[in-house]
Amino acid sequence: MSYLVEKKINIIFKVNNIEHRIIYKGLILISIISLIKPLRKYEDYVYRANAYEHLFMRKKAIRILNFSTKQPNFSIEEKSSGFIYLGILYSKTKEFNLASDCYHQGLELMMHENFNYHDNFKKAIETFIKSEDFERANFWLNNLIQRQSYDKKFKKLAELEKKVK
């Protein structure tokens, strides 16, 4: 649900007449630019949050994403993606109740829409279980498993049924 761009940058330099080659991934460059660029589009918020997360500043990343979910001009898909990303960040900080709430909000926004399977849905169900929110875990697990009618990958979630019951 989030967007990532990767480009490789080759840097070649010589030390003592020995050629050295360093390959930087464009993600680093995009992260640096995202800290300066004004926040206008959803992707700008995601890139900036991602940059803060890579700089070990998760709380700032969470603040940026919280702000993105309140933007009136963003689509339902973008807001949903923001909530899912927030759930991931809160899970990484072991704040499972907040993560559970964010995952729920993200899924709820897309409840009546068709969307493709993503591994983050498994993380969401596991977070519901960790926060002992078995009602949500059961509800969303059933909802997501039913979606295999249009995307067979949702069947991967069936293995979690034992943990929910």
Image (cartoon, helix red, strand yellow):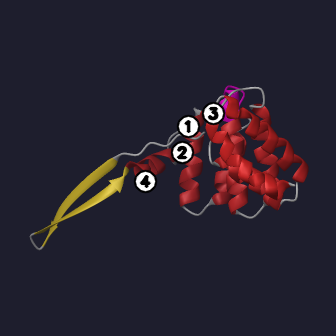
* Label 1: how many Cα within 10 Å (few below 14, some 14–19, many 20+): some
Q: Position of residue 128 (x, y in %)?
A: 81, 54
Decide: few, some or many residues near mark 4? Use Cα within 10 Å; few <14, some 14-19, many ≥20.
some
Determine which residue is flagged by label 1: 43
- The residue under label 4 is 28
- Residue 33 in the image: state x and y as whole percent: 45, 46
User: What element does badge 1 sit on?
Assistant: helix
In the picture of the structure, the residue carrying the numbered disc 3 is 151
Sequence-first disc among 1 and 3 = 1
Q: Quadrant where the N terminus lies?
A: top right
Amino acid type at circle 2 is: Tyr
What span is colored magenta in the figure? 71-79
Q: Could you tell whether 34 is left or right of 9 in the image?
A: right
- Sequence-wise, which precedes: disc 4 or disc 3? 4
Whether residue 39 is visible, yes or no, is: no
Residue named by callout 2: 47
Residue drawn where x is 72% and y is 44% of the image:
66
Q: Give the foreground label among 1 and 3.
A: 3
Query: Badge 2 local density, few (<14 within 10 Å), some, or many (20+)?
Result: many
Query: How far apart are the alpha carbons under marks 1 and 3?
Result: 26 Å
Label 2 close to label 1 by CB (< 8 Å): yes
Q: Earlier in the sequence, mark 2 or mark 3?
A: 2
Q: Type of residue at label 4?
A: Ile
